[in-house]
Image (cartoon, rainbow, N blue to C red):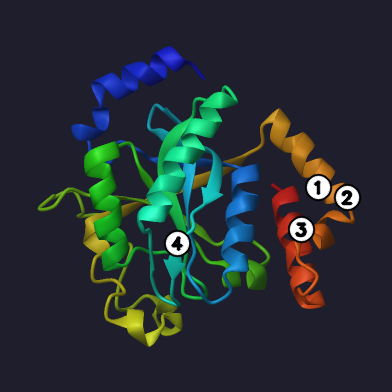
Amino acid sequence: YSSLSSKKLVSNQPWKEDVNYFETAYISSLALLKMTMHARSGGSIEIMGMMTGKIFENSIVVMDCYPLPVEGTETRVNAQSEGYEFMVQYLDNLKKLNRFENIVGWYHSHPGYGCWLSGIDVATQSLNQQFQDPYLAVVIDPERTMANKRVEIGAFRTYPENSNNNANNDNDKNNNPRRGSVPLSKLNDFGVHHDRYYSLDVKFFKSDIDSKFMSNLYDNKYWSSELLNKETNEMYEKEVEAILDISAKL
């Protein structure tokens, strides 16, 4: 990674000329673990958080993430003023630790109904791409992650309005086999906005720090019980261990 090359990318802004410029989202194992844990902790309620990282040529790299204090429902989540204040404070604290990573996007959960963008998600992502690009939207399905023992995750970017660059988009549609698992309140929204965004390839990586951190967590049998409050049941403890197992296999 070169800060000089990153600054050059930001200065040239090639994504303004090529709306498909970003092709890959690289997510650290630590960020993946934190997102998955956060998503699972919400149960059937959507959660939301921010991602920090860097940009490379044709790629957005997610180094870390943090949850936002937001209100969610079973089918949507919105950041309020408290959430935005929290973002500013978090970035200030990162700089004090000599970590000069920027916000590179947001993540939220779709519990049980797959990884795609709703109309509200598209509007949120489009607005952020207008004012703080490069910006990435990540969706994680914690229920399918636990059921399939692999991370169910998607990374997306939106097209500008009236863009003609969606001819090869295959995010949808009415014949999508996952349509049956979408909640009724989301069903009419499913696939409607498929031509407004595209998917990036998602790849995971471990830094040296990530590897040491994950190893310590995975080897510490006491950690999972300490992470959870005393009222958490045994089933959820097993879910925590399963999430750790998924992350450890990356």
Query: To which residue does mark 2 refer?
Result: 220
* Whether residue 107 is situated above or below residue 46 in the rendered picture: above
Which disc number belongs to residue 227? 3
Note whether 17 is above or below 85 in the view shown. above
CA distance for labels 2 and 1:
5 Å
Q: At label 1, which amino acid type do we have?
A: Leu
Q: Nearer the viewer, residue 25 or 80?
A: 80
Q: Nearer the viewer, residue 156 or 234?
A: 234
Q: Find residue 117 and report its horizontal and vertical position in percent.
A: 34, 63
Q: Position of residue 193 (x, y in %)?
A: 24, 65
Identified at 22% across, 57% down, the residue is: 196
Query: Which residue is the site of mark 1?
Result: 217
Is 122 drawn above or below residue 210 in the view shown? below
SS for callout 2:
loop
Instruction: Kindly report which numbered mark, 2 or 3, lies closer to the viewer in this rendering.
Output: 3
Residue type at the position of mark 3: Leu
